[in-house]
Image (spheres, helix red, strand yellow):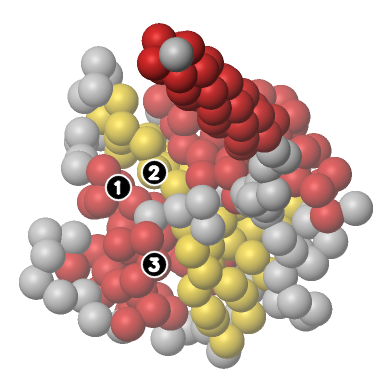
Amino acid sequence: MHSNTIRGEKQEEEVEDNRNSQAGYVEFKALKTAPNTSRPERRVRWKPPAQETFKINFDGAIFAEEKCSGLGAIVRDREGLVIAAMATRVPQQLQPIEIEALAASKALVFARELGISEAVLEGDSSLVMSALNSKNPGLAPFGLLIQDSLNVSTCFSKLSYSHTKREGNTVAHSLAQLAVNASNCVIWMEDVPSDVLSVYHADLAGIS
């Protein structure tokens, strides 16, 4: 009798364990198959400027093997059409932040030479854009280059600064990469080089 009681208790425990195991498996499976409700990150795209203003995008590049640097800039209107683009080779191999700051300054000078007086300057270096927005060059090694940009900015009747990610700055990035093959400064009026057409058209498609 005692033996039967023990056997019965063991059977009940096994049944209970099986139930718990099955319940745990169902819960685990539900967690694995539950849909991901988190919102995917929106892809960053180039955005046109407001009406009656222009957008100046710039970027820098470093070429370690050639021991030089490069910068690129493009000016576009509110429809995304090119006013002008440029690529410039810099004979020194600068630090990343230095070439970005230099590119910002050269881009502003380029825009003023085109007769642009109202614009948005946009780049993908958060440090450079933050320094320009604060109008404080600071004591950093690139401070003098930031001051150059601030000096040129006084020649504009209206100028604002915008930071974007690399995905929103692809044309300027591609132009800077082309600078490695430039002897000095190359300018394209109302056009971009063939090597940059695909990323430029992607920008246009993104705003259409």
Secondary structure under the numbered disc 1 in the rendered image: helix
| Chain-order first, disc 1 or disc 2 | 2
Residue at the extreme front: 1
* Residue at 64% over, 65% down: 55
Q: Amino acid at mark 3?
A: Met
Marking on residue 139 = none
Give residue 30's quadrant in the image. Answer: top right
* Residue at 39% over, 43% down: 60
Give residue 148's quadrant in the image. Answer: bottom left
Mark 2 surroundings: few (<14), some (14-19) or many (≥20) residues within 10 A: many
| Chain-order first, disc 1 or disc 3 | 1
Secondary structure under the numbered disc 2 in the rendered image: strand
Mark 2 vs mark 3: in front: 3
Tell me whether circle 1 and circle 3 mark residues in contact (CB < 8 Å): no
The residue that mark 3 highlights is: 129
Task: Classify the position of the N terminus by image quarter.
Answer: top left
Residue at the extreme bottom: 157
What whole-number distance in Å separates the C-alpha atoms at marks 2 and 3? 14 Å
Secondary structure under the numbered disc 3 in the rendered image: helix
Residue 202 spot, x, y in % from top left: 77, 38
The residue that mark 2 highlights is: 60
Residue 80 spot, x, y in % from top left: 78, 56
| Chain-order first, disc 2 or disc 3 | 2
* Residue 106 visible, this angle: no
What whole-number distance in Å separates the C-alpha atoms at marks 1 and 2? 5 Å
Judge whether 197 appears above or below 131 on screen.
above
The residue that mark 1 highlights is: 99
Mark 3 surroundings: few (<14), some (14-19) or many (≥20) residues within 10 A: many
